[in-house]
Image (cartoon, rainbow, N blue to C red):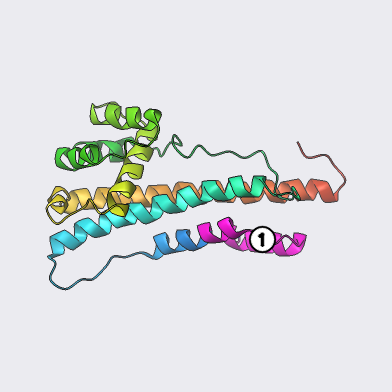
Amino acid sequence: MTDSAFKRWSDFLRNEKIEDTPTTNRFIARFRLASKFTGINADGYSEKTLRAYNSLMSVFFSHTSFDSFVEAIAENERREDKKLLLNFEVDLHNHPFEDLQLAEDIRSNEKLMNIIIDYADISRTSVQMEALMSFYGGVIGGAHLNAVAKQIRHLVAHGHMTAYGSDAVDKDNGKALFSLAELIRNETYALFDQYVSKLEAKYVKLHLGEKFE
């Protein structure tokens, strides 16, 4: 059984005597929270309302962990010592989360999509809004799930989700949103694993006196 990407990252930093990676530390903490999140308990709320909040918050936590990973890469690239300089890029706004059936399940919930559109963060890039609107219109691709997830994150973070809005999330739709959150986490972990592997390979070559391309 191979070590997790998180353990390998920790071992890599220790072995290469690299310190001061605050945003990567924050990413790991957020990812673990997103992975462990099972829901909230609140007196006076129906099971249906809590199910809606929990499924949306699961997407929120998962996408914020993806966001913090992208920020971590950028911070590591800017280090003055260049110890973590690496040709590794992830497009925050357009990185695809691929699952066409899941995309269709979410798009078919017209009430949820209307809420997402009504409270869309218009300060975001026009490319993202175009992706969201084309998804709403029936054009489905991996990049569209990213746009949807970002808007759900905005919906939760800015308090636009209400008990009324939770009616848009029934049991089946809630499962689809939990699946979206899991898809984002799996993709984020896979990207982090690739990132760590590439750094490990870079230092193997450096220790052997070879040039890293």
Quick one: 159 or 195, which is closer to the camera? Answer: 159
The magenta stretch spans which residues?
3-27
Residue for point 33% across, 49% down? 153
Residue 184 in the figure: left or right of residue 202: left
Q: Residue at x 11, y 53 (%)?
A: 164
**Residue 166 visible (yes or no):** yes
Q: Main secondary structure of the magenta part?
A: helix
Residue 4 seen in render: no
Query: How far across and how far down the image is residue 146, in percent?
Result: 38, 39
* Residue farthest along the bottom direction in this orientation: 43
Q: Is residue 175 magenta?
A: no
Number of numbered labels in the structure image: 1
Label 1 secondary element: loop
Q: Position of residue 189 (x, y in %)?
A: 50, 52
Other-residue count near label 1 (Cα within 10 Å), few / some / many at <14 / 14–19 / ≥20: few
Residue at the farthest front position:
123
Q: Is residue 169 left or right of residue 10?
A: left
- Determine which quarter of the picture holds residue 134: top left
Q: Is residue 208 left or right of residue 105?
A: right
Residue 2, given in percent of the width and then of the height, sits at 60, 59
Q: Where is mark 1, residue-wise?
A: 20
How far from the left and from the top, in percent, is residue 163?
14, 57
Name the residue rendered at 63%, 51% in the picture. Answer: 196
Left or right of 174, for residue 147: right
Quadrant of image for the C terminus: top right
Q: Amino acid at mark 1?
A: Asp
In the rendered view, would you say 206 is above or below 120? below
The N terminus is located in which quarter? Answer: bottom right
Q: Is residue 60 above or below residue 145?
A: below
